[in-house]
Amino acid sequence: MSDKKIKFEFEKQNKNSIRYKEVPEDGMPPVIGNIYVQKWFAGDSKNIEVTINKKD
């Protein structure tokens, strides 16, 4: 198993969600790109982190 932590920063606020853009590691392409997180969960967070687990 392999874990990858991906950092995101605030980009845009929509009616019910917030769009975050990925902050890629130096010299690497984005793994995910943009993600949308519902406002009720994201709150006022300007930075978030997502962990991906590869199972094989």
Image: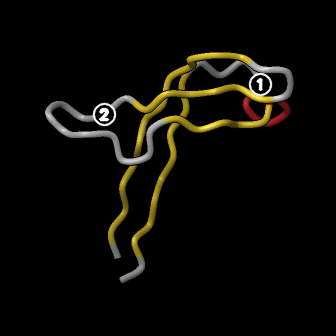
Instruction: Out of 16 and 53, give the one closest to the viewer.
Output: 16
Q: Residue at x 59, y 18 (%)?
A: 46
Instruction: Report which quarter residue 33 is drawn in.
Output: top left
Q: Is residue 40 left or right of residue 46?
A: right
Q: Residue at x 18, y 30 (%)?
A: 26
Q: Position of residue 25 (x, y in %)?
A: 24, 35
The span from disc 1 to disc 2 (Cα, nearest Å) is 23 Å
Q: Position of residue 17 (x, y in %)?
A: 77, 29
Image quarter of the N terminus: bottom left
Q: Residue farthest to the left?
A: 27
Q: Is residue 36 left or right of residue 6?
A: right
Up/down of 25 relative to 18, above or below? below
Q: Residue at x 64, y 16 (%)?
A: 12
* Mark 2: amino acid: Pro
Q: Residue at x 48, y 31 (%)?
A: 8
**Which residue is the site of mark 1?**
43
* Secondary structure of residue under mark 1: loop
Which mark is drawn over residue 24?
2
Image quarter of the C terminus: bottom left
Q: Are marks 1 and 2 in contact (CB under 8 Å)?
A: no
* Mark 1: amino acid: Gly
Please rate how many residues cluster around mark 1, counting C-alpha atoms within 10 Å: few if below 14, some from 14 to 19, many from 20: few
Q: Is residue 40 left or right of residue 51?
A: right
